[in-house]
Image (cartoon, rainbow, N blue to C red):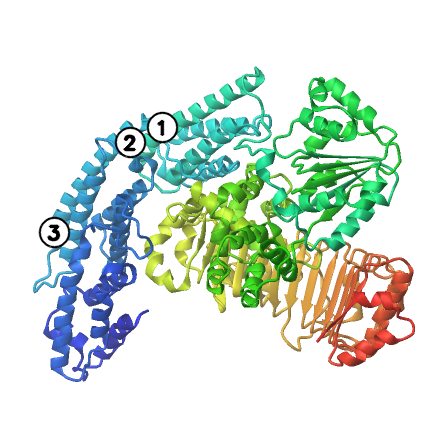
């Protein structure tokens, strides 16, 4: 509530005191007879505030309202002055009750007629909502609101965007102006005598007749434009393979839950549903999925599906749905005919199936030579891969170098190819480039020319069979090295890999690829090498050598030069591109500063030269990954994205295929891993189990997302508020905009909102709800009964409603919901436990347990975090057997309870935080913690001695101890072969010593991976332990000290 409204409210309370007379609001209401109805002045303030908040060209209103707000109330003269200003305010806002000549919204600068009308209709709907709250008016006013809502939805539909002789926009503008004048005359004019209800009804009836004429014009217009060749508006040039699945869900929901809105249309919608099922089946033809014509048909399908989805979820009148459904049916049939014709052409050989659907780039244009003359930062990796080439097994081995575009894979491969030790080791060497334009004959020709004394003309004249035979004979019995540069698809290797003989003599094949999958699938014995990005120091070294060759960098350019190198973020390609620019400009500090400030734009200024190298990765993506990758452009640059939020957003947008037996989030995670393996996305952080926790995208690739997303209209469509599936509602805008915009969110699937509003009950497609409030938030009954809601997260705490508790007390049966995660939920009594039983599909639960409940019925639960009140005496716990991750906080743990936890058959991660053990000795026995990989004990008190069996924690990988009173780690941990990390933070020195002893013995047994990480308040004492007799110097590099 803003200060003006608060002032009005406080003044109204003061008026209840009969002795209070000296008030400007009292003066308006009593002496001046200002209000034509109760709340009239409040309505004026609210509408003026709406205008002030959204209209950029009328900022004087802010000053005007402030003047009224700050007015003194000390005398009747002051009150009269306020009254006069309010009357002036009424005159000032009158102009806003007609359609503006240009867009006035602060949120956009577009002057498109549709957007101007959109803005004005939204303004009128806001006024009607405020009128309803202050002075409820029934009957025809509600009809007016529905009519305006339909016009708003029509302006978002395709026909409104196509001109015709019958274009109804002029008629729509006229009826909107009449609506504005009607509202102003009845609700915003100060009348000495209130206008009668019959006057309102008469004028409103006349206004509604005008709406009927406009609707007739709309109908005629829709019929005309449906016959135009361009009647489908291109929403985005990015195909979404699974949009039809989403649309079928919408139709099912409409038939089951909204049958009263489609009376007389059931049969037509059922037929339409069957046509969509046939279309979906046709689109799943894998033979077509690599063909450019199919991608175009998929894009057309995506556009039409967006249209249909928008109409279905806009609650149109039946007459409009009756008009549009046959038009959609015709469009779908045309696409079906196109698919059938394309398949026929492929089967008959009229067109071929192409591995790559877009613009081709010749090998000469790819330009790996831009990096080959100067190599920086690959010394360690070069030595490692060189060893793999000349050492190791005798059988034919495939070695893969994969990394993001421009990182220097080809450069390193060429350096290895020409390395003297490699040249001397192999009898024959050959280099070939596959690229995306794979041609087997060309590849074999390149290899043969390298390994045999055949001229190009002779080889070119050979047929395929002769080429294969010549290649095989030229390699057999020789130790050879074949470098296959830029291989994109494992099918390429499957096509010709069998022609390379294996004489068990140490031959090697070296791949460079952007896809980790290529190396993994090529052979069970493949060696995979990821090429990392350069450090800041290496970037600066490369930049200097490219710009200054053998000269030194002038001292005045060193600081800014290092900044530019750092801004390249480790990508050699970026360094080389910037170096080429710096070479051609003046060597002056202020000019280099300009380059530093605008690095990303400088890189993208010449997309024809360098952009193709990056864009090839996008163009080669499978169609289902393209929208997922471009979606990164919807985030901020350099943003580290939560994988949970990202994958849930993909699901909400409809990018993810529904697979039997897998959750949509699991499938989305697989898509993300695929993008990571293609070197398009970088891993920022991982979970304790090694899963990707956060990720980011390199600036160059981010710029590419923006560029392609804008070219294909993808980002604009994703961010469109006319058909949102994802919406983040800013707290500061919620009260102003919520009431008028809620209806537009009926299609929302992922919603971030400040608090839960009762009107959210209409969001029947909502899947993910995030409440930003840090306070306790009550869960209304309707949320628990939403069939599609799967994730409910609150920044503070969630609590079941009193209504739900009453139903539980009366033993009412709750409908089982589909919630998969809830956090953080307060469970305070047995009734809450009963309510929770309706969420038996939960996979993840975070809760604050004020009274213990039996949770064993949650047999699908995989992750559980239980927090108890301080000093709470916990009783015997009963936990779901399927748990994989368990976190206990403020828990009093008896040894019997510890054994129950230890026997959980699937437990992989156990975290104990600020817990207490009963007694000073913990004895773990055989059979406990058989699957545990991660054990973290933080501020765990009560035990000092830990005795483990001879076979403890057989699969443990990480042990972390922090602020524990433990004397030492059990010596039996020396026998755990899977151990990779021991973290000791602020524990006794004896614990540090035992950790190092375990590392020493693990080394002796061949475990070179084990790391010990130590955080100690007595850092010098910890460092001294390195010098003790049993710790040899080579192992010191595996111990990290942290202050």
> Circles 2 and 1: CB distance less than 8 Å?
yes
> Which residue is found at the position 83% from the left and 45% from the top?
421
Badge 2 marks a residue whose secondary structure is: helix
Relative vertical location of residue 682 with respect to residue 463 in this rendering, above or below: below
Reading the image, the residue beneath label 2 is 222
Viewer-side residue, 91 vs 912: 91
Measure the alpha-carbon separation of dots 3 and 2. Answer: 36 Å
Q: Secondary structure at mark 3?
A: helix
What label does residue 198 carry, if any? Answer: 3
Name of the residue lying farthest toward the left: 192
Residue at label 1? 327
Residue 99 relative to residue 367: left or right: left
The residue carrying pointer 2 sits among few (fewer than 14), some (14 to 19) or many (20 or more) residues within 10 Å by Cα, namely: many
In space, the residues marked 3 and 1 are separated at their CA atoms by 42 Å
Dot 1: element:
helix
Q: Are marks 3 and 1 in contact (CB under 8 Å)?
A: no
Q: CA distance from mark 2 to mark 1?
A: 9 Å
Residue 761 picture location, percent across and down: 42, 52
Q: Residue sitting at 32 percent across and 28 percent down?
A: 226
């Amino acid at each position: 509530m803003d200060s003006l409204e608060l002032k009005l409210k406080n003044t109204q309370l003061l008026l209840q005191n009969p002795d209070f007379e000296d008030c400007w609001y009292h003066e308006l209401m009593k002496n001046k007879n200002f209000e034509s109805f109760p709340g009239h002045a409040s309505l004026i303030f609210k509408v003026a505030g709406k205008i002030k908040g959204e209209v950029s060209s009328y900022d004087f209103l802010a000053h005007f309202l402030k003047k009224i707000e700050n007015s003194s109330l000390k005398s009747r003269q002051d009150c009269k002055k306020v009254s006069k200003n309010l009357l002036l305010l009424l005159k000032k806002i009158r102009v806003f009750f007609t359609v503006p000549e240009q867009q006035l919204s602060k949120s956009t600068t577009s002057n498109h007629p549709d957007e101007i009308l959109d803005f004005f209709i939204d303004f009128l709907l806001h006024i009607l909502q405020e009128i309803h709250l202050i002075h409820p008016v029934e009957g025809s006013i509600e009809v007016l609101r529905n009519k305006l809502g339909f016009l708003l939805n029509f302006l978002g539909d395709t026909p409104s965007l196509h001109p015709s002789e019958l274009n109804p926009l002029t008629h729509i503008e006229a009826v909107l102006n009449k609506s504005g004048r009607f509202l102003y005359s009845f609700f915003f004019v100060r009348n000495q005598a209130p206008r009668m209800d019959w006057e309102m009804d008469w004028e409103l009836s006349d206004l509604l007749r005008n709406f009927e004429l406009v609707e007739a014009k709309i109908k005629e217009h829709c019929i005309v434009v449906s016959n135009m060749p361009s009647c489908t508006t291109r929403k985005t040039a990015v195909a979404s393979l699974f949009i039809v699945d989403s649309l079928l869900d919408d139709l099912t929901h409409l038939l089951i839950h909204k049958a009263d809105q489609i009376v007389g249309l059931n049969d037509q919608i059922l037929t339409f549903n069957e046509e969509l099922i046939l279309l979906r089946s046709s689109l799943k033809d894998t033979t077509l999925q690599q063909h450019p014509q199919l991608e175009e048909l998929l894009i057309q399908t995506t556009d039409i599906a967006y249209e249909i989805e928008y109409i279905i979820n806009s609650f149109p009148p039946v007459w409009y749905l009756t008009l549009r459904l046959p038009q959609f049916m015709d469009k779908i049939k045309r696409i079906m005919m196109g698919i059938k014709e394309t398949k026929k052409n492929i089967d008959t050989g009229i067109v071929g199936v192409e591995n790559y659907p877009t613009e081709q780039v010749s090998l000469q244009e790819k330009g790996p030579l831009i990096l080959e003359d100067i190599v920086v930062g690959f010394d360690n990796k070069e030595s490692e891969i060189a060893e793999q080439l000349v050492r190791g097994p005798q059988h034919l081995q495939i070695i893969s170098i994969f990394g993001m575009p421009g990182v220097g894979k080809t450069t390193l491969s060429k350096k290895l190819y020409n390395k003297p030790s490699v040249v001397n080791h192999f009898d024959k060497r050959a280099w070939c480039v596959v690229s995306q334009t794979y041609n087997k004959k060309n590849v074999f020709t390149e290899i043969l020319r390298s390994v045999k004394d055949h001229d190009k003309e002779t080889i070119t004249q050979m047929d395929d069979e002769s080429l294969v035979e010549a290649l095989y004979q030229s390699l057999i019995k020789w130790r050879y090295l074949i470098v296959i540069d830029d291989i994109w698809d494992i099918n390429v290797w499957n096509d010709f890999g069998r022609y390379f003989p294996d004489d068990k003599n140490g031959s090697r094949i070296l791949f460079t690829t952007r896809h980790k999958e290529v190396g993994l699938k090529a052979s069970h014995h493949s060696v995979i090498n990821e090429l990392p990005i350069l450090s800041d120091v290496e970037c600066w070294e490369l930049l200097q050598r490219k710009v200054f060759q053998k000269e030194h960098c002038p001292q005045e350019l060193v600081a800014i030069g290092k900044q530019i190198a750092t801004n390249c973020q480790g990508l050699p390609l970026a360094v080389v591109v910037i170096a080429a620019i710096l070479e051609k400009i003046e060597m002056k500090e202020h000019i280099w500063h300009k380059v530093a400030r605008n690095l990303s734009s400088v890189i993208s200024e010449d997309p024809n030269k360098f952009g193709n190298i990056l864009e090839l990765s996008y163009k080669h993506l499978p169609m289902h990954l393209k929208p997922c990758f471009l979606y990164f452009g919807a985030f901020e640059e350099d943003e580290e994205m939560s994988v949970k939020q990202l994958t849930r957003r993909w699901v909400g947008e409809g990018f993810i295929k529904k697979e039997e037996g897998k959750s949509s989030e699991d499938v989305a995670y697989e898509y993300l891993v695929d993008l990571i393996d293609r070197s398009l996305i970088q891993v920022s952080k991982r979970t304790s189990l090694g899963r990707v926790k956060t990720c980011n995208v390199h600036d160059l690739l981010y710029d590419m997302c923006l560029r392609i997303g804008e070219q294909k209209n993808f980002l604009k469509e994703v961010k469109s508020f006319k058909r949102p599936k994802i919406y983040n509602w800013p707290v500061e805008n919620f009260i102003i905009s919520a009431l008028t915009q809620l209806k537009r969110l009926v299609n929302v699937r992922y919603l971030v909102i400040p608090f839960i509003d009762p009107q959210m009950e209409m969001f029947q497609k909502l899947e993910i709800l995030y409440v930003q409030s840090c306070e306790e938030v009550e869960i209304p009954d309707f949320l628990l009964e939403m069939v599609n809601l799967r994730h409910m997260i609150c920044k503070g705490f969630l609590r079941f409603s009193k209504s739900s508790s009453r139903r539980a007390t009366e033993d009412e049966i709750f409908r089982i919901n589909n919630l998969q995660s809830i956090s953080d939920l307060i469970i305070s009594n047995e009734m809450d436990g009963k309510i929770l039983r309706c969420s038996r599909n939960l996979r993840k639960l975070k809760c604050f347990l004020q009274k213990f409940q039996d949770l064993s019925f949650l047999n699908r639960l995989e992750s559980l975090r239980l927090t108890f009140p301080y000093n709470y005496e916990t009783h015997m716990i009963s936990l779901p057997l399927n748990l994989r991750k368990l976190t206990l906080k403020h828990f009093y743990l008896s040894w019997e309870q510890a054994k129950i936890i230890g026997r959980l058959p699937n437990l992989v991660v156990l975290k104990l935080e600020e817990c207490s053990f009963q007694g000073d000795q913990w004895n773990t026995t055989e059979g406990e913690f058989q699957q545990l990989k991660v054990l973290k004990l933080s501020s765990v008190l009560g035990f000092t001695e830990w005795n483990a069996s001879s076979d403890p924690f057989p699969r443990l990988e990480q042990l972390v101890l922090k602020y524990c009173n433990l004397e030492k780690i059990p010596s039996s941990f020396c026998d755990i072969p899977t151990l990779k990390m021991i973290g000791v933070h602020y524990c006794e020195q004896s614990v540090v010593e035992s950790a190092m002893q375990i590392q020493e013995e693990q080394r002796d047994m061949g475990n070179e991976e084990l790391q010990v990480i130590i955080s100690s308040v007595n850092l010098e004492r910890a460092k001294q332990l390195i010098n003790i007799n049993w710790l040899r110097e080579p192992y010191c590099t595996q111990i990290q000290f942290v202050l």
